[in-house]
Image (cartoon, rainbow, N blue to C red):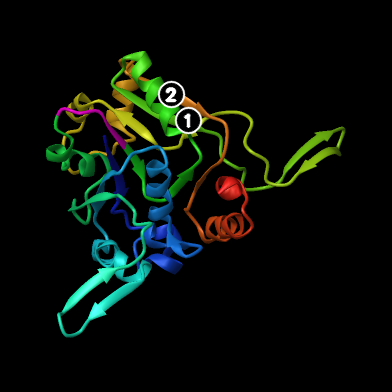
């Protein structure tokens, strides 16, 4: 099964980084966030990735084209002109790098990948959101309901401390709790190929007409994930995600 990762957006809200690199290449620890996303799928046996590139896509191409050079021990024979990678723990990933246009919107990027999807069920997620969802359970849920699409519904961490107030007195203060009411789109979709029929062209936003129409027709199911999810949207998100990584919290608590 192929996993499409939307990695072509401009990332304007975190321009401290994206003036130089695309958002999926922002490093969390020693690896770009897109690597962490792909590695999560890989832990559940998925290894076929299609990266929908756009803004500064050459940075993502360069990273993966040179991945082994920078992440493996190397033996060079200057006489023979040969190169051997010495480490045995090589990632068994198959990566398709596809330029889906600089200004193409999220739905349009998926539509452009029709030749990769063909007639198979496929997965889609964003190149800036990390999640601890159990992919095997997500896929089992999708297959059980028979609908065209499944979205992972999440409850993100609140951006501000939560106050419980009674008669002008704070009865409870909780710093950055998880949102308790309401679910949002967390990405980590599972789609049947007929979902592509709901996407018109490059100017189609996945989160508008396609998902709205699928929901209206009863073809969009939600898989509720009540554990870690976080989107790298602002500098504050970056600082928090780095803290989670370095101190083995959140997604990285069991890694």
Task: Identify the disc placed on residue 153.
Answer: 1
Question: Which quarter shows the N terminus?
Answer: top left
Task: Identify the disc placed on residue 222.
Answer: 2
Q: Looking at this view, is 201 or 112 the one in front?
A: 112
Q: How crowded is mark 1: few (under 14 residues within 10 Å), some or many (20 or more)?
A: many
Q: How many marks?
A: 2
Q: Which residue lies furthest to the bottom in this view?
A: 79
Q: Where is residue 243 in the image (x, y as percent from the top left)?
A: 61, 59
- The quarter of the displayed image where residue 247 is located: bottom right
Q: Position of residue 174 (x, y in %)?
A: 75, 42
Residue at figure coordinates x 29%, y 75% from the top left: 75
Residue at figure coordinates x 48%, y 35% from the top left: 133
Q: Position of residue 150 (x, y in %)?
A: 37, 26
Label 2–label 1 contact, CB within 8 A: yes
Mostly what secondary structure, the magenta segment? loop
Residues rendered magenta in the picture: 119-123
- The quarter of the displayed image where residue 99 is located: bottom left
């Amino acid at each position: 099964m192929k996993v499409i990762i939307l990695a072509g957006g401009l990332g304007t809200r975190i321009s401290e980084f994206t003036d130089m690199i695309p958002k999926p290449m922002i490093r969390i620890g020693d690896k770009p966030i897109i690597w962490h996303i792909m590695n999560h799928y890989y832990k559940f046996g998925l290894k076929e990735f299609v990266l929908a590139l756009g803004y500064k896509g050459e940075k993502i191409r360069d990273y993966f084209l040179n991945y082994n050079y920078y992440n493996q021990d190397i033996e060079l024979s200057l006489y023979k002109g040969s190169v051997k990678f010495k480490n045995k723990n090589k990632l068994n990933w198959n990566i398709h790098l596809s330029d889906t246009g600089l200004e193409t919107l999220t739905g349009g990027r998926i539509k452009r990948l029709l030749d990769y999807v063909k007639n198979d069920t496929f997965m889609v997620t964003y190149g800036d959101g990390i999640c601890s969802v159990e992919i095997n359970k997500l896929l089992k849920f999708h297959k059980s309901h028979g609908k065209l699409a499944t979205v992972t519904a999440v409850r993100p961490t609140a951006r501000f401390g939560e106050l419980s107030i009674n008669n002008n007195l704070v009865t409870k203060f909780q710093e950055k709790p998880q949102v308790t009411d309401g679910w949002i789109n967390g990405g980590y979709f599972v789609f049947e190929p007929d979902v592509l029929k709901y996407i018109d062209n490059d100017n189609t936003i996945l989160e508008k007409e396609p998902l709205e129409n699928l929901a209206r027709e009863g073809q969009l199911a939600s898989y509720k994930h009540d554990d870690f999810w976080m989107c790298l949207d602002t500098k504050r998100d970056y600082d928090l995600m780095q803290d989670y990584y370095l101190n083995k919290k959140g997604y990285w608590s069991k890694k």
